[in-house]
Amino acid sequence: MLDLGLNGKVAIITGGSDGLGRAAAAAFCIGLVRSAQIARRAKGDLEAHYAELAKQRVPLGRVAHASEFADLFAFLVSERASYITGASVNFDGGSGMTV
């Protein structure tokens, strides 16, 4: 599954050559991230547009940068996260209603 719209979803599944090796699955529930897609919809000042989106939709109060998601992804595919399996990660600034 790969859909990086405003409420994007990404699923990553890996396995060993026999399918029984180190297996990991992760689902990323992505909230608002600064992107060209959002920028094209903005009318006028882009920073003001992001601020208004964040005010309306993100409890943390800001829109994420793509580099923040890249850092999370890089960690989860690294050896440092080798013990994490079957995880679902909400990358949404608190807008998801999960605990």
Image: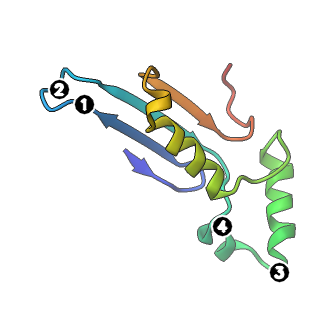
Closer mark to the observer between disc 3 and disc 1: 1
Name the side, left or right, on which 60 lies relative to 11.
right
Residue beneath the point at 44% across and 32% down: 79
Q: CA distance from mark 4 to mark 2?
A: 39 Å
Foreground residue among 70 and 62: 70
Q: Which circle's residue, 1 or 4, is located before the other in the chain?
A: 1
Q: Pointer 3 and pointer 1: residues touching (CB < 8 Å)?
A: no
Residue under pointer 3: 44
Residue under pointer 2: 19
Residue under pointer 4: 38
Name the side, left or right, on which 15 lies relative to 47.
left
Image quadrant in which the C terminus is located: top right
Image quadrant in which the N terminus is located: top left
The image shows residue 85 at horizontal and vertical percentages of: 42, 22
Q: CA distance from mark 3 to mark 4?
A: 12 Å
Amino acid of disc 3: Gly
The image shows residue 96 at horizontal and vertical percentages of: 68, 33
Amino acid of disc 4: Ile
Amino acid of disc 1: Gly
Residue beneath the point at 82% across and 80% down: 44
The image shows residue 12 at horizontal and vertical percentages of: 38, 39
Q: CA distance from mark 1 to mark 4?
A: 34 Å
Residue under pointer 1: 15
